[in-house]
Structure formats: structure tokens, C-alpha cells
């Protein structure tokens, strides 16, 4: 399952589903046996996609909020994760498992902070010097989640951060 997806067709170059299908999930790739459940962006509206994806998430992951075993997240250079961008309504959603996010000019379908936080293990993958400042803010206990929405992810177990040398330089 995806933590978020841009509201584009699955064949669009900006689609996370397309990227996964061409890399990890291709017939010769490491995930060839994986079961993949993409966000249904083929539906008529983002709202319809949210409702369908939420129903599917709740079916696969019981609990309130739904609980995944592992949540693998990226970190944007602006401090966003999934499609929880600074200053957007998606960061304030607490009652739903899935919401509409908006960022970088596209509507997006995203799991909410309570669902991301409910995972048994949360892992952030951070790569590149452009993410260094966002990583510093993520690790700063005094940093506001308003400016760095990735800080909204607050699981019970310790968060694992895997950062390359460029992202972690000077931390």
C-alpha cells in the first residue's frame, strides 16, 4: 500500500504506483512476489478515491486508527511526509484514515498522521543534501509540526531514520 499518491493516472510519470511498478515490482525486480494495492486514482474524483482507499485500508488493517506493521516514509525538503504538507488541512485531519492533501501543484491522496503514527515501526528514508535542513528539524525536539509536518508522526516505538551522508552531514 502507498502512504500517498498524486491525483494522476497510474501511467503518469509523476505516479508513485508507476515508479514502484517499474522498479521494485517489475517482473524481474526484488518485489515480484509482492501484493500491491495502489490508490484508486482511476475514480472520478479525489473524494471518491479517498473513500475507496479508506475502506480498503480499514479492511486490511483493523483497529482505529488502522495499524500497519511497517510504515516506510520519505521526508520532503519542506518537512512534509506522505502528503502532509506545511500549512495544509491534511495535517489537521484526525478523524479519517485517508485525506486529500495538496502539495507542489497537485492534489494527492494521503494516509493521515494518526494512521502513520499507529504503525508498529516507522522508518524515514532521507537522501540528499537538499533534505539536510528538514532532517535537522525532524530530529529537533523543539521543532513545530506546523513547520515540519513529518513531526506529526509520533509512534509508540522509536522511529528509525536512515539518512545518507549528504542528508546527515553536520548533524
Image (tube, helix red, strand yellow):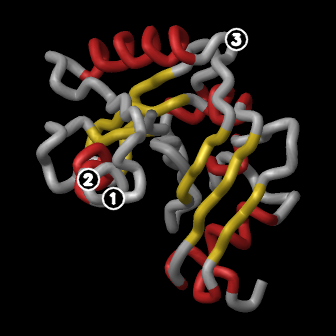
Please provide percent x and percent y for residue 22: 23, 56
Check disc 3 and report the residue beneath it. 63
From the viewer's perspective, is 61 left or right of 6?
right
Q: Is residue 61 above or below residue 92?
A: above
Looking at the rendered structure, the secondary structure element under dot 3 is loop
Give the camera-side residue of 45 and 5: 5
Q: Is residue 112 visible?
A: yes
Q: Secondary structure at mark 1?
A: loop
Q: Are marks 1 and 3 in contact (CB under 8 Å)?
A: no
Q: Residue at x 62, y 48 (%)?
A: 149
Instruction: Say if residue 105 shows up in the picture.
Output: no
Q: Tell me, yes or no, whether the two marked residues, 3 and 2, touch with CB atoms within 8 Å.
A: no
Identify residue for label 1. Answer: 29
Q: Marks 2 and 1: in contact by CB < 8 Å?
A: yes
Residue 100 x/y as whole percent: 39, 28
Residue at 68% in and 68% down: 162
Dot 1, crowdedness within 10 Å: few (<14), some or many (≥20)? few
Report whether 41 appears left or right of 104: left
Q: Which residue is mark 2?
A: 26
Mark toward the start of the polypeptide (1 vs 3): 1
**Residue 64: quarter of image:** top right
Amino acid at each position: 500500500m502507498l502512504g500517498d499518491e498524486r491525483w494522476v493516472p497510474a501511467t503518469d510519470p509523476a505516479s508513485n504506483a508507476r515508479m514502484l511498478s517499474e522498479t521494485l515490482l517489475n517482473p524481474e525486480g526484488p518485489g515480484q512476489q509482492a501484493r500491491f494495492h495502489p490508490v484508486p486514482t482511476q475514480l472520478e474524483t479525489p473524494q471518491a478515491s479517498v473513500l475507496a482507499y479508506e475502506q480498503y485500508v480499514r479492511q486490511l488493517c483493523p483497529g482505529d486508527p488502522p495499524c500497519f506493521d511497517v510504515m516506510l516514509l520519505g521526508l520532503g525538503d519542506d518537512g512534509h511526509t506522505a502528503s502532509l504538507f506545511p500549512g495544509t488541512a491534511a495535517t489537521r485531519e484526525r478523524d479519517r484514515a485517508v485525506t486529500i492533501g495538496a502539495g507542489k501543484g497537485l492534489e494527492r491522496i494521503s494516509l493521515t498522521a494518526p494512521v502513520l503514527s499507529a504503525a508498529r515501526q516507522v522508518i524515514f528514508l532521507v537522501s540528499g543534501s537538499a533534505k539536510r535542513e528538514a532532517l535537522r528539524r525532524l530530529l529537533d525536539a523543539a521543532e513545530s509540526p506546523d513547520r515540519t509536518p513529518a513531526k506529526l508522526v509520533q509512534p509508540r516505538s522509536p522511529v528509525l531514520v536512515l539518512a545518507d551522508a549528504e542528508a546527515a552531514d553536520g548533524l
